[in-house]
Structures are given as C-alpha cells and as structure tokens.
C-alpha cells in the first residue's frame, strides 16, 4: 500500500466546514424516523432560482449547434463585450472589454489573480470574518492570509486604521469582499477609497471580491470599486461571477477585471491551468444581458430583499441578534450567544467545537434547520456566530423561523 507524502500546501487547507455540516445534516436526515419533518437547509449560499429562461434556451441552442469546443483563454470576445456594457449601464463605469478575463467561476479568477501576484511569504491582509476559501487561495499561492479582527462598528470590514497598523515588510496587499460573505455588509465607500489610496501608495495590490455586487439593496453601497475616481478604480483587481446575481452556480463561470498590463500575465496562466472556461456556459451567459433576462434578475433581487426584510426582524424576535443589517447578498450573521446559553451548551473548545458549532448541530437535530457555524469564517469570536442563508424561498424561511422559535422562544 502506498504511503503518500502530502504537500504542505494541501495540509494547510482546512475543511470547508459549511460542506462538512451539510454532509452531517444529510446523514442525520437519512437516519431519521419515517415521517420526520423535512430538513430545511439555510447553510449554503445558493439561490433557489436557477438560470434565466433565455440562458437555458441559449445553452440548448449551443449544444444543438455544436458550440462546445475550446474558446479563447480570455473568454468569448462577445461575452467580454457584454460584461463591459453591463458595467456601463448598471454602474456607470467604463470598463474596456480588453481588461475583462472570463474564468471558470470566481474561484478560478481568485486563483489566477493570486498566482499572478503573490510570492512565497507575501502577506495579504483580510477581514475577520471573511469567506474561508479566499484565504485558502492566498495560501495555495504560497502566501499568508493575515486576518484582522473587525467590529460591527466597522461593518465587519477592513478599516484604514487596522490596515495601516498591520502593514509590514512582507505585506503585499489586501483582499476584501463587498458585499461580504458571511455578513452581507459592504464597505463604507469613503473608507474603501482611503484604503485603496493607502495600499496604492505603498505599491500594494487591492483584490476585491464583488460577486454579490449585483445583489445590493442600498444605492449608497451598491457601486463597484472600479468606479472610484482619480484612476484608483483602474488599479483595483475585481473578481465577479455569474453564480449569485445571475443564478448560474453550477455553470462555473466568472470573470476578472484587471489593470491592462496584467491581462497577458493572467492569460498565460489561464492557458496552462484551465485552457478556457466552459464553452457552453459562455454561450449561454450571453443571454444574461438580454432585457428580458435582466428584468428577471431584478425581480429576483427584489425577492431576495423581501426575504431579508422578513427574516432579520424574525431572527431578532427569537433572540438571534444581527449586529449589522446586511445591505447586499443573502446572509444574516447572527450573534447566537443568548441561544447557546438558553440551551445550556458548552463554550468554545480548543478543537473548534462548542459554542455555535454545537448549537448548529442542536438546530439540525431538534429543529431540523441547517445553518453554518462561525467556525468557517475566521478566528475572532467565531463561536458566537451563526450564518443563515436567506436564499431559500419565503415559505422555507417562515417555516424555519417557526421551528427555531419553538426551540429557542
């Protein structure tokens, strides 16, 4: 039997706990007695809507027409043009198609950006809490993610004060998300500008995950960092995706907006690592920008907003306080301290269990509601928090609140 020596980079990658919890929930459900209430999954950030009608029709046509062969590594020129036009019409910012690289999901976009810009030992400053996979992309490029604790007063975002205090000899730049997963909060625009000015003055890089930008509910926050004035936006590396606003999660299609000089660098990497994104997904995504599709996405955005507006006060009523009202995405990051105490659960343990981890499993077993414990998202009090996804239907959310209320009320 082979004894494999596992690479250090692989050993540094922690489990994606949202997936681990989902696996455990499915096993608990499988072993449940007949007639048990169906499990409600509020743990994974996936819209309950699927691809728009015209997108599915375009995919079928691409298959019928045999449009299944390799595309250019940078993506279909027509798709890059459509994305460019969307930035102009939606956000009022001119982003030349030549700066847009279509990728195999936002994950590939982040991997390409990190491999292009991060050397071994480089440090990337990130907010705590944050989406766990982002820090692992840094680690896989032999960099080091440095998590800076944030507060509700800072909207759980990096601040100029925290970044300037943490900036050191090995700091390469910052990686942030706006709106954020797990909190659904965006960075205050003035603070974002100050951050980018600070980083740019030190020759650093600014990577901004904007995959939830299309799902913004507040015009004050719902603007791309690419629109920042005085050429600041042109230095930003923006990561985006067809998964969330466009409801194409399993199609694995995203994009990067890069400074022009980085495009050929990323192209070389993409040619070798991915060849190209899915041809069928790209041809289908062209239909995302048809007026009928865009109207469908905007209707869905309003549905997500209505779900947020119902779910947040409902959580508050049963003692799960949300410290900052999310202005985008479809998450509620709730302080579960009162619920942990009410159920008599233990505090955090050295192995990462206890606190909200144990609470999550109590909710699975006793309320049959699956949520994500804060353990996934950082090191600053993760045992206090639960992340709820409000991407499920209103009926599912109402039933979840009813069950949680019976347990915690």
Image (spheres, grey):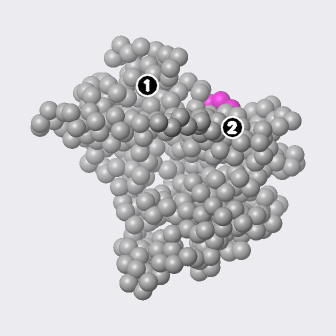
Q: Residue at x 43, y 25 (%)?
A: 356
Q: Percent position (x, y) of residue 198?
A: 83, 45
Real-space Cα distance between discs 1 and 2?
24 Å
Residue drawn at x 75%, y 60% as measured from the top left = 233
Residue 356 is labelled as 1
Q: Is residue 151 left or right of residue 304?
A: right
Can you see residue 312? no
Placement of 255 over or under 406, stated as above or below? below
Residue 107 appears in the picture as rendered: yes
Q: Residue 383: image x %, image y %?
A: 49, 24
Task: Tell me the crowding category of disc 1: few under 14, some 14 to 19, or many 20 or more residues within 10 angstroms, Cα based.
Answer: many
Q: Earlier in the sequence, mark 1 or mark 2?
A: 2
Query: Which residue sits at x=33%, y=42%?
Result: 41
Query: Which is nearer the eye, 360 or 17?
Result: 17
Q: Secondary structure at mark 1?
A: helix
Give the foreground label among 1 and 2: 2
**Which mark, residue 335?**
none
Q: Is 69 placed above or below 238 here?
A: below
**Residue at image point 63% right, 53% down:** 110
Disc 2 crowd rating (10 Å Cα; few below 14, some 14-19, many 20+) is many
- The residue closer to the viewer here, 328 or 21, is 21
Q: Which mark is residue 145?
A: 2
Front residue of this view, candidates 206 and 15: 15
Give the extent of the magenta segment: 148-153
Q: Based on the picture, tell me whether residue 195 belongs to the magenta stretch.
A: no
| Left or right of residue 61, residue 278 in this image | right
Furthest residue in direction left, as rendered: 35
Relative placement, left or right, of 227 versus 296 is: right
The percent coordinates of residue 371 (x first, y second) are 38, 36
């Amino acid at each position: 039997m082979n004894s494999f020596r596992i690479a250090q980079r692989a050993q540094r990658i922690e489990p994606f706990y949202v997936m681990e919890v989902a696996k455990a929930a499915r096993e608990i459900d499988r072993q449940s007695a007949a007639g048990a209430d169906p499990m409600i999954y509020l743990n994974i950030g996936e819209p309950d809507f699927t691809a728009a009608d015209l997108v599915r029709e375009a995919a079928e046509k691409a298959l019928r027409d045999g449009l299944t062969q390799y595309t250019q590594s940078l993506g279909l020129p027509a798709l890059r043009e459509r994305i460019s036009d969307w930035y102009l019409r939606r956000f009022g910012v001119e982003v030349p198609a030549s700066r847009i690289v279509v990728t195999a999901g936002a994950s590939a976009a982040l991997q390409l950006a990190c491999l292009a810009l991060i050397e071994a030992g480089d440090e990337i400053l990130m907010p705590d809490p944050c989406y766990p996979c982002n820090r692992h992309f840094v680690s896989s490029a032999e960099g080091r993610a440095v998590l800076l604790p944030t507060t509700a007063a800072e909207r759980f975002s990096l601040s100029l004060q925290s970044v300037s205090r943490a900036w050191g000899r090995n700091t390469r730049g910052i990686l942030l998300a706006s709106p954020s997963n797990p909190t659904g909060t965006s960075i205050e625009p003035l603070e974002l500008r100050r951050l980018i000015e600070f980083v740019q003055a030190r020759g650093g890089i600014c990577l901004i995950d904007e995959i939830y930008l299309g799902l913004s509910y507040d015009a004050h926050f719902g603007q791309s960092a690419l629109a920042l004035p005085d050429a600041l936006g042109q230095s930003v590396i923006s990561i985006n995706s067809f998964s969330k606003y466009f409801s194409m999660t399993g199609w694995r299609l995203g994009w990067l907006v890069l400074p022009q000089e980085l495009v050929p660098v990323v192209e070389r990497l993409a040619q070798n690592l991915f060849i190209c994104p899915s041809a069928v997904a790209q041809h289908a995504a062209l239909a995302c920008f048809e007026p009928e599709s865009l109207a469908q996405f905007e209707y869905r955005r309003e549905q997500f907003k209505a779900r947020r507006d119902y779910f947040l006060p409902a959580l508050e009523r049963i003692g799960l306080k949300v410290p900052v009202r999310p202005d985008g995405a479809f998450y509620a990051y709730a302080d579960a301290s009162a619920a942990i105490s009410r159920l008599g659960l233990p505090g955090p343990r050295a192995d990462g269990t206890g606190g909200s981890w144990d609470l999550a499993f109590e909710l699975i077993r006793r309320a049959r509601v699956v949520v994500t414990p804060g353990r996934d998202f950082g090191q600053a009090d993760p045992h206090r928090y639960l992340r709820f996804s409000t991407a499920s239907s209103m009926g599912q959310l109402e039933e979840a609140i009813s069950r949680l209320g019976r347990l915690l009320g």
